[in-house]
Amino acid sequence: MSTPISKVSVHGGHSGQYCLHARDTLDQVVQAYIAEGYSWVGITEHMPPLDDSRRYPDEAEQGVSAAQLKAQFSAYFAEVRQLQARYADRIRLFAAFETETYHGSAAFVRELIDETRPDYIVGSVHHVGGIGIDVNRELYEEARAWAGSLEQLYCRYFDLQLAMMQELKPSVIGHFDLIRIFDEDYLDTLALPSVWSRVERNLGFIAEQGFVLDFNLRGFDKALEQYPSLPVLKLALQLGIAIVPGDDSHGVASVGRNYQRGVALLQSLGHDCRWQLPLLFPWARSP
Ligand SMILES: [Zn+2]
Ligand SMILES: [Zn+2]
């Protein structure tokens, strides 16, 4: 007899209340996790932009300033702490956030950590050469042109990821190979020696540090398969890296989406589906 597989999310809980490209209130999103029977969930809203030039295009279009987004981020943290307490008997919530990676972001992340004292952070890269790679195909092409080639775009992405991991030591690594988002031939691109050696190098660092890899179920909707893609996932498992589902939910409708599909895939690869908790900051560890 097999023990039931618990439902967890190491990366999710974006809400329309605190993120322009998400939907619903944070309370509604948390209630959806409870209704779906989740045991624990890391609420990992995006960090605010360093300055106005670093805003997402939708934020700039709607005229929301970096200062407003920063204030909204503080409100977000206050609310996650309230929800954590309110629903403590029904679900274990972690108050966390997802990083950006661009020039000057690391120092800003450290400031935000000092200010908000999160339970943990998710280290993500959404920009190469300062250009957002997951916003739309046009910007992706712009980033590719900046890098010089698709191969170079992947190389720069994985180099930025390594530098970010070395600087911030985030206990969860978000959507490891997001760089393939608009590349239909990503299996070929990942297999290029210059790219694959960087994948191996970064996974080696993750294994050595004991970071958790976000098994990002949103990839099924946005990029043909989950992040990380199958060859990366197989190597991560060989290296003994903890792989934990993250639904990367951006509203009630995406809470728990693709969970069974993700679990079935992990089981087929021999994963025991016993989920490791991310390493928490010292101030968040229970006595
Ligand atoms: Zn988002
Ligand atoms: Zn992300």
Image (tube, helix red, strand yellow):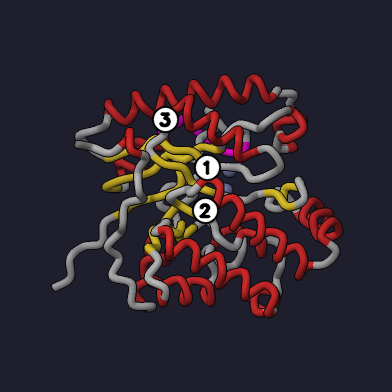
Q: Tell me what residue is drawn at x 70 percent, y 37 percent.
A: 56
Amino acid type of the residue tagged 2 in the rendering: Gly
For label 2, being within 8 Å of ligand 2 is answered yes
Q: Label 3: which residue? A: 117
Taking the image as drawn, is residue 252 in sight?
A: no
Q: Which residues, given as a range, are shown in magenta?
A: 21-28
Rendering coords of residue 117 (x, y %): 42, 30
Mark-to-mark CA distance, 3 and 1: 13 Å
The disc labelled 3 sits on which kind of residue?
Arg
What is the spatial separation of the Cα atoms under label 2 and label 1, in whole angstroms?
Answer: 8 Å
Residue at the image position 31 percent from the left and 31 percent from the top: 84
Quadrant assignment for the N terminus: bottom left
Residue labelled with disc 1: 98
The mark lying in front, picked from 3 and 1, is 3
Where does the image place residue 150, in percent across and percent down from the top left? 78, 67
**Residue 70 in view, yes or no:** yes
List the residue tagged with mark 2. Answer: 174
Q: What x and y, as percent, mark residue 20?
A: 62, 33
